[in-house]
Amino acid sequence: MPDEIVMAAGHRRPRVRAATALCGVFCVVLLAGCSGAKPRVEPPELEPVAGDMSLHGLWYRQPQIRHAPDETPLTPFVEGRRFFYSDRPDRVVALDARNGRRVWSTVLSPPTEEGPVRLSGGIGAGEGLLYVGTDEGEIIALDPDDGAVRWRTQLSGEVLAIPLARDGTLVVRTNDGHLSALDPVSGNPLWSYSSTVPALSLRGASRPLIDQGRVFAGFANGKLAALALDSGEVLWEVTVGVPEGRSELERMVDIDADPVLVDGVIYAAAYQARLVALTSVAGSVLWSRELSTAQDMASDADTLYLAQDDGRIFAISRRSGAILWQQDQLAGRMITAPVLYRDTLYVADQQGYLHGLSLRDGHFVARFHVSEDAIALTPVVSGDVMYLQTVGGALHALTIDP
């Protein structure tokens, strides 16, 4: 079906990745039958929301090829007037962010004739280029103006984290526990850091964070590391998640949520473990709280917002770690990570709903049924526009007004 634009008036669900092919065969069985598997919580019925928020569709774009049920679309990237996303496993597309019209598209050819390219992770940017990774461990740099391939480099494992380039260095996390630094202009390797990989881990990886000559990265073994950006020297390592339990599933403590850095304090969360606040210079723990998430957090001047794995949403004081409020009514709805938009906190869910919560106390101030399909990715906010992508690959550009 051809691309179509209809003008109008990254859920990332935790999935287990096995360290060996044999474990991968039994992943579904383990999740269903292991003592560490958590029982599914049936979502409660949604109650009407009394509010005067209004949703306006700016544009809508149908996918060229509907994504398979087990495929999660790549996290898109928005910069200025360009919206970059992948509408099929081997293609990157640039749209005009204002009206959804296609500017360019690039189909990536495979490095060999063994099979097509399958993009993974998400679209990264920096130092004047776009970067995408593949499930075969390639990192590919594209020109954002025309989609031309500038270089390709083979890494040691599948790229599941969004690449990040800043201060003259491109850093990429791969699923084999490596953090690789590359020259963003040429793709030549600069240095590599290696962490241990547990037998089972979630299929995903947090995006590294770069600040003042340091790179911070979380790993599947529950550790957060700070390294010198120019050399890869380890400055400090802190264990955020301590493996506990008898089974490998119970002992998963991946750091899949992107670390958050505000005013010299870095916040990191581990799956089935805890949320910690640390000094970015020395890695000293300021406070910790038992909360579990595999999704990114939102933050403002005083507060962190976190969606726990069971669908409960928490507002947490950045200063003390105290829970300011808790919203339980979306438990079991497999919600996305929270995002801030126009002084409201939003999450989407697998039934295609978009929920707006008050920053003050967490009560619902808006609810919209955007799609019959599940919202596949955390909403992306750029300026006054929110972008949503469904599991089938459809794109919605929206604004929400009080």
Image: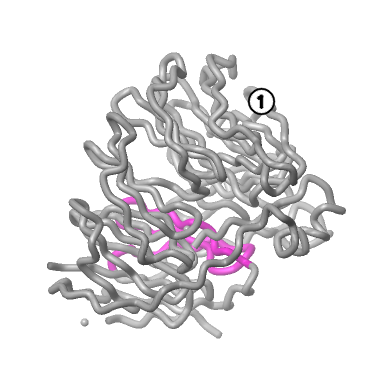
Q: Secondary structure at mark 1?
A: strand
The x and y percentages for residue 56 are 22, 75
Q: Nearer the viewer, residue 159 or 261?
A: 261
Q: Is residue 164 above or below residue 367?
A: above
Residue 51, image quadrant:
bottom left
Q: Nearer the viewer, residue 55 or 254?
A: 254
Residues in magenta?
71-98
Residue 104 appears in the picture as rendered: no
Residue neighbourhood size for the residue with mark 1, other residues' Cα within 10 Å, grouped as few (<14), some (14–19), many (≥20): some
Dividing the image into 4 quarters, which one contains the N terminus?
bottom right
The x and y percentages for residue 137 are 71, 45
The x and y percentages for residue 207 are 51, 40
Q: Is residue 174 magenta?
A: no
Q: Nearer the viewer, residue 354 or 6?
A: 354
Report the side of 64 relative to 298 (left or right).
right
- Three-letter amino acid code at the position of disc 1: Ser
The x and y percentages for residue 9 are 21, 82
Residue 173, image quadrant:
top right
Q: Which residue is mark 1?
A: 192
Q: Residue at x 44, y 29 (%)?
A: 210
The image's colouring method is one colour
